Amino acid sequence: MSAPKLDLAALKRIAEAATPGEWTAEEWCGTEGGWCAIGPHHEATEGEDYDDAPGSDCHARAQRDSVYIAAANPATLLQLIERLERAEALLRDVHCDPSYSITAELDDRIRAHLEDR
């Protein structure tokens, strides 16, 4: 059975809709049970509704983040890694260089572009 086709455009839209920033996973255990928070820390800004009731800013953000978390599941990430590994292997063959890495080349290009500014 083959893996489902990755919809890269949908994954990109989902990631762009998620809350930006460094994400963390934290777990608290208290007298009323344990729970975890996954995502970036977010402070309410002036005028922002921080209530978690349906329709609130907080609730809408949590829904977008939940879709992102569900989309970034192990099967999807493994498919993305496999595609990257296959692409890098193909590029190594094209460049006749067993140490070739697309990410290293992109880093070099970005660095050079920033230095030219």
Image: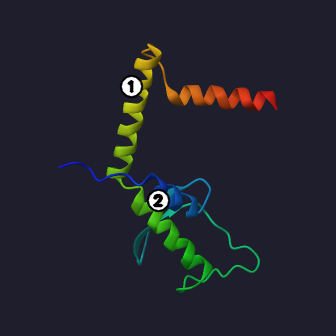
Is residue 107 positioned above or below 15 on the image? above
Q: Secondary structure at mark 2?
A: helix
Sequence-wise, which precedes: disc 1 or disc 2? 2
Specify the label residue 10 is tagged with. Answer: 2
Of 85 and 30, nearer the camera is: 85
In the rendered image, which residue does mark 1 sit on? 89
Outermost residue, right side: 117
Outermost residue, top side: 96
| 56 to the left or right of 80 | right
Q: Residue at x 70, y 79 (%)?
A: 48
Q: Position of residue 66 (x, y in %)?
A: 46, 68
Examine the image and state in which quarter residue 109 appears: top right
Specify the quadrant that holds the C terminus.
top right
Examine the image and state in which quarter residue 91 appears: top left
Outermost residue, left side: 1
Q: Residue at x 59, y 53 (%)?
A: 22
- Viewer can see residue 35: yes
Name the amino acid, label 2: Ala
| 91 to the left or right of 112 | left
Specify the label residue 74 is tagged with. Answer: none
| 79 to the left or right of 117 | left
Q: Are marks 1 and 2 in contact (CB under 8 Å)?
A: no
Name the amino acid, label 1: Ala
Q: Secondary structure at mark 1?
A: helix
Q: Position of residue 53 (x, y in %)?
A: 54, 86
